[in-house]
Every structure is written in C-alpha cells, then in structure tokens.
Amino acid sequence: MLMSASAASRPGASRGACAGVALLSALVVFAWTAARIHYACDGNWTALFCTGTTLRVPPDLDAGTYRFEGHGYDGQFYRFLAQDPSLQKGYYRYMDAPQRWCRRLLVPLAAWSFGFGQRDWIDGAYIALELLFLALGTYWCARLLVRRGRSPLWGLLFVVVPATLTSFDRMLTDGPLTALFAGFLLYCEEQRWNRVWVLALLAALTRETGLLLVAALVVDRLLRRDWRQAAWFASSGIPAIAWYGYLAARLPPDGPASMFGIPVWGILRRLLWFRPFPDPRVQLLMRVTDFLAVLGLAISMILAVRWLLERRLAPATLCVGLFAALAVVLCSPSHMIEVFGFGRPVSPLLLWVMIEAVSRKKWIALAPPLLVSLSVSVAFARPFVTVMQSLLRR
C-alpha cells in the first residue's frame, strides 16, 4: 500500500489522489444514504434528523417531518437550530436542553447560510455540509498518511470512525468535529499555524470538546514560554466562549447533566453491566458487540498512551492526550449506555490510533478502534436488509 517514490515526490499528483479518495467516500456514503431514504423512509430526507414522536416540533416544520417512534436523536435539535440560528423564532423552546444544543452552532449556522435562510433549502444544505465534512476528513487523513509514505486509500479509514458513521446517519456534529481534528493533525505536522488557528476556532464552535484543540495549542506555547503565541492561539476560542456566554444570558438553564465521573469507572461499569433487549437474539448480538466496543475503547486508550509517551510534546500529541483524558473520565449513563453515546466524543482519539497504526505498520492495532465502529455499524443492519430486499424484489 506504499506510494511509489515518484508519486511521493509530486505533491500535486498526491493531492489529486487524495481528492479522488475523498470524492469516492462522499459518493459511496451518499449512494447508501439515498437508497436508505428511498426504500426505508418513504423518500423523506428529513428522516436523517431522527425526529421522535414524543417531543414537540415547531408547527411550521411539523407537516413535512418524518417521525420515529420514541424520543428521537440529537439531529432533530440541530435541525431546529439551523432553522433559527438567531433564536428569534423561539425554536429553542422545542429542545430538551437548549443551551447544550445551541452551543454547537457551526454546522447549523453554516446550513442556514448556505440555504440562504430559506426554510425549504436549509435541510438540504445541512445534509450537503455533512457530506462535505466527510469528504474533508477523508482528504485530510489521506494527505497526512501520504506524508508518511502510505497510500491515499488509507484515508477511507475516516469513513468508519464512529463519529462519521453516526453523524451522517443522524446529522450530528461529532463527524464534522472529527474532520476538523484530522485537518488539525495535518496542518500541525506541516506547521501551517494560520490554518491550525482557523480549524481550532471552527472546532470550538462545532462542539464543546473542540475547545480541546484550543487548549492543546495554548498549553504547548505556555510550556515553551511563548506568551505571544499562546495569547494568539487562545484568541481562537473567543468566539465560542462569547457565544456560550450569550446563550447563558439568553436561554433558560439546562437540567443538571454531566458526562464526567470517577476515572475509568465508566468503562469498568460498562464491561460488567448490559442493557437488556426484549428479543434474545438481538440481546446476544448486542451483548457481544457492545462488550467488544468497550474493550476496544479501553485498548485504544492504552495504545494511545503508549505511543504518546514515545513522541515529543507538540500541539497534536497534547490534543490526543486531552481526548484520552476525556475517555478516562467518561462516566455518565446517558453517554455510556450505548456505543452511539461513548464512541462519538472520543472519535478523535480513535482516529489518531488508526492513523498511527497505519503509519507504524502495526496492523493488529487497527482492531481495537474498529471494534468500536463494528458495534456502531450494527444499527445499520435493519435498514440494509430493507434496502436489499427492496432491490431484489425489483
């Protein structure tokens, strides 16, 4: 899978190959999604936002919204924010935790902007943005691995990261954040600090854990006693902090919730406890894949720590270390109850482990993060069967 020496010496050619891999990833994911929406969701693309039946929907969005039984998932709230990023319509009143969802502004605001504020265009713009971030994440991973002498096809690993799988399936912000993290790794390695600053700013506005990119940059400069650069990197977090402050003053407080707890306890508890399912066949499958996912996360953390200790301190390694620390203190039952919960916040860590495994040719080290992805992919089994049955009946 190594590039030839001549290809490696032609940056333009390698970038073209990386762009081709990114385009391939976007086309494959779009084709699968289009088939799922057509055959399993009556052709209604709002099904991607996973809106539940137990929560209210703004009246002007309700009529055309595809609804799932139950509470739904986070994408429905990002859709409300994309339709009302200025909070003037009061759509935040339909969110169960308005400050939490509204803090994650970047993707919804970009969807509103690219949809020109038109209600009928914003959903399509949001879906297109998710596809764009998927392609960017693949491109940046491919570029990074080409720099390390690997084939650009290894960039496709980005597609199977838990955050990527879940984000395009349910229109979440974790995939875009992980894509920005991939760009962060590349441009830190290339020492293109202006781009790193921009990516840190965007990451902080994408999700709260994006502030870890800002923190890594600041800590690295402080350790080197470069006060001016530390202040400059710290400024990349100002827009996010200002937005958080505005929301705290404008919106009602969320209920008490925390994703943190006693270090390692969340992982240990998940290894010993399992959520029951009524169907015994489903329960067996989920028990096995769920256990493997938690075990894969634990091994990935160990691998990350081991490899970080072999590297010198730098913004990228500090950032990975912060995501590893996040994985250690994840403990909230709402996050740890399923791999969709605990796999998304730590996806940058899992992506870095996969990139390092390929870079070092430690192929067996790909297994732990892929076990987490395997558990996520089980959720696609039912729509996949539906699509295949529909195709075979044609």
Image (cartoon, rainbow, N blue to C red):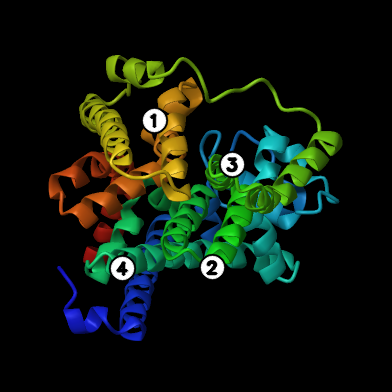
Q: Of the residues tagged 3 and 1, which is closer to the observer?
A: 3
Name the secondary structure under disc 4.
helix
Q: CA distance from mark 3 to mark 2?
A: 39 Å
Q: CA distance from mark 1 to mark 4?
A: 36 Å
The reply to whether the C-beta atoms of the residues labelled 3 and 2 are less than 8 Å apart is: no
Q: Earlier in the sequence, mark 2 or mark 4?
A: 2
Residue 342 at x, y = what percent? 42, 33
Within-10-Å neighbours for mark 1: few <14, some 14–19, many 20+: some
Q: Earlier in the sequence, mark 1 or mark 4?
A: 4
Name the residue nearer the viewer: 78 or 179: 179
Name the residue nearer the viewer: 386 or 306: 306
Residue at which label 4 appears: 147
Q: Earlier in the sequence, mark 3 or mark 2?
A: 2
- Residue at image location 67% in from the left, 32% down from the top: 96
Name the secondary structure under disc 3.
helix
Residue 116 at x, y = what percent? 73, 71
Residue found at the far front of this picture: 225
Q: Of the residues tagged 3 and 2, which is closer to the observer?
A: 3
Query: Which part of the image, by quadrant, shows the C terminus?
Result: bottom left
Residue at which label 1 appears: 338
Q: Amino acid at mark 2?
A: Ala
- Residue at image location 67% in from the left, 70% down from the top: 114
Q: CA distance from mark 2 to mark 4?
A: 29 Å
Q: Earlier in the sequence, mark 3 or mark 4?
A: 4
Residue 91 at x, y = what percent? 77, 46
Q: CA distance from mark 3 to mark 4?
A: 28 Å
Within-10-Å neighbours for mark 2: few <14, some 14–19, many 20+: some
Relative to 32, 42 lies left or right: right
Q: Earlier in the sequence, mark 2 or mark 1?
A: 2
Name the secondary structure under disc 2.
helix
Mark carried by residue 222: 3
